[in-house]
Image (spheres, rainbow, N blue to C red):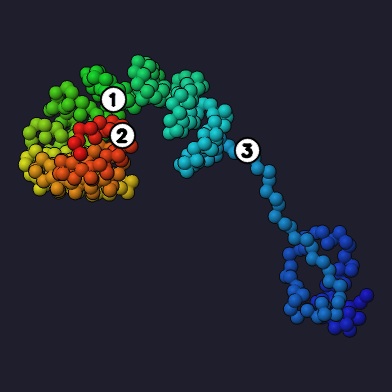
Amino acid sequence: MTRAPLLLLGLSTSCAAAYLASVAAPRASLNRLPEARPSVSIFGRDATCLAVGAAIPSPPPLRSAQPPAATTSPTAPELYERAVLLQQMRRRDESLRTFERLAELTPGDGRVWMRMMTLHKLERRWGRAEATLRRGIEALPQNALLRQALGDLCRERQRWDEARAHFAQAARLDPQLRSVYDSWGRMEASLGRHTLAAELLQRGLELEPTARTYHALGVLQDSKLGQRDKARETLRRGLRLPDEHRNPQLLHALGKLEAAAGNAPAARAHYLAAIDAAPSFTMAHLALGKLEEGLGRYETAARVYAQGATTLQPDGGMGPVQLWQSWARMEQRRGRPLSARRLYERACRHHPKDARLLSEWARLAAELGDPAQARAIFPATSRLSLGYLSATSRLSL
């Protein structure tokens, strides 16, 4: 067929040419991608092709996106990243299963055993945590950190001799491992072996000075070894570390040292600096409040207690029970029982499950001649702590 009859049918030149080309081309050409050339629209000026029912060549099939390749097994780094993310999302069982799979794939990765141990400890599965560490040590007998972790676990379970043996083994495996001397030294200090503890902490500082270890050694020197001047210098060295000049724990320890030495102005300055660095640091508020109370500066002490008790904590709550109790007890000692009673009532609104706080409030209510309130408070106290049941028998309500 020539182009003329097609033109008589009302087809445009371009549409007629397209039709003739389709008839002449072999069928196989329909399965080939067209050569790159300007496309011809059939919906613009050539729409008459459709109106007269002329045969329009089927467009060549478009190359569709290939289906994704079959999912391959994740690599060990990908599994580790997923397990850590699950742990951060508190999906601990899933995280643990993923780490277990990793332990089979890469038993030589000490981080996996440590993570698994931590997950078991978070669920208070002490036996499984220990078994995990022993499996890790079996796979990595030269890993000092795993050995130290087992020592820490034994220390937490008060198996002192085992803990000491594991710490010693970790130190032999890696004499440069600072953290083992910190853990070991703190354990010995808690057991009253103060000289050995100081030696271990000092060894850790020689390997890597840290504010944490300077704090532990300074407190030990001051409170247990009677080495106040050494302790003062130790704590100051900690403050001279990079970015530690406002460390609240070190400042608080220096404040306690100066208070014990009778240097109230220096103690006050250190406590205030600690509070300025960490406004929710309870121990600094308590120490400063007691210092001012001991000096007879009751209004100042009340302001300190109030500031600490009403400062929002990281968890969003008010200050801890100890600050409210210290504040209320001071009011009682000052002969202001009604003020103390109001403080107990306020404190119990923030800490309704503290048995000791409730017991003190009830006892004060009874002393003030309000047995009805005391009777109302004590049942809640007894439900919270059987240790306070005997308190009811000491009140003649």
Question: Label 3, label 2: how many angstroms apart (C-alpha)?
Answer: 53 Å
Q: Nearer the viewer, residue 310 or 180?
A: 310
Front of the two marks 3 and 2:
2
Q: What residue do we see at 65% from left, 43% from top?
A: 71
Disc 1 target residue: 186
On the question of residue 278 being in view, the answer is no
Q: Are marks 3 and 2 in contact (CB under 8 Å)?
A: no
Q: CA distance from mark 1 to mark 3?
A: 45 Å
Q: Relative to residue 343, is residue 84 depicted above or below?
A: above
Task: Indicate which label's residue lies in the foreground, 2 or 1.
Answer: 2
- Which of 375 and 85 lies nearest the eye of the viewer? 375
From this view, report whether residue 2 is shown above or below residue 287.
below
Q: Earlier in the sequence, mark 2 or mark 1?
A: 1
Q: Which mark is residue 385?
A: 2
- Spatial CA distance of label 2 from label 1 is 31 Å
Closer mark to the observer between disc 1 and disc 3: 1
Relative placement, left or right, of 5 versus 140 is right
One can see residue 161 in this view: yes
Q: Amino acid at mark 3?
A: Ser
Where residue 292 appears, as percent x and y from the top left, is 10, 42
The quarter in which the C terminus is drawn is top left
Q: What residue is rendered at 9% in x and 43% in y?
A: 335
Counting residues from the N terminus, which is met first, the one under dot 3 or under dot 2?
3
